[in-house]
Amino acid sequence: MSNWLQTMPTAEAYGLNKVLFELHHKADDLTAYRDDPEAYLDRYDLTPRARAAVRGNDVAELYLVGANPYLLRAHCIGMRIPEAESLAALRGAGKKEDHHG
């Protein structure tokens, strides 16, 4: 079983998925994030790459870091990222990976 591109989810992916889960499944977390994103993210031990992906709503980068597909979808909905935009980002993630890899 794999988590997107990873055979075994990394610690980076775990931290990212924890943020995405709590952000969209715990009462008041989305409001806290919207009020002060930096303070909210300071609660978590995120890599700079994962933190930047969350802050920038970079769907392709979230995917490449290892975001769970259901949590990524919830994040796109919660942050009101248009579906066409999120799907285009996912389609382009392979091209982005070619440049990072």
Image (spheres, rainbow, N blue to C red):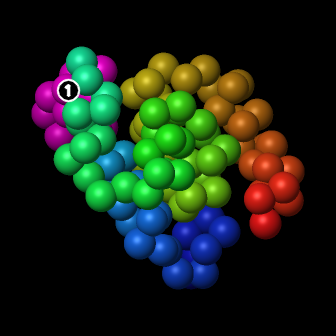
Q: In percent of the image, x 39 and y 66: which residue is there?
A: 14
Q: Which residues are magenta?
A: 23-34
Quadrant assignment for the C terminus? bottom right
**Where does residue 37 sit, x and y in percent of width and height?**
31, 29
Tag 1: residue type?
Answer: Ala
Quadrant assignment for the N terminus? bottom right
**Where does residue 26 sit, x and y in percent of width and height?**
18, 40
Q: In percent of the image, x 24 and y 18: which residue is there?
A: 35
Q: How many marks?
A: 1
Residue position marked by numbered label 1 in the rendering: 32
Q: In percent of the image, x 31 and y 32: which residue is there?
A: 38
Name the magenta segment's main secondary structure: helix
Q: Quadrant of residue 5?
A: bottom right
Q: Secondary structure at mark 1?
A: helix
- Asked if residue 26 lies left or right of residue 67, the reply is left
22 versus 87 height, above or below = below
Q: Nearer the viewer, residue 38 or 80?
A: 38
- As for residue 32 lying within the magenta part, the answer is yes
Residue 11 visible in this rendered orientation of the protein: yes
- Asked if residue 95 lies left or right of residue 47, the reply is right
Q: Quadrant of residue 79?
A: top left
- Asked if residue 85 lies left or right of residue 63, the reply is right
Q: Nearer the viewer, residue 98 or 63?
A: 98
Q: In percent of the image, x 26 and y 52: which residue is there?
A: 44
Residue 69 visible in this rendered orientation of the protein: no
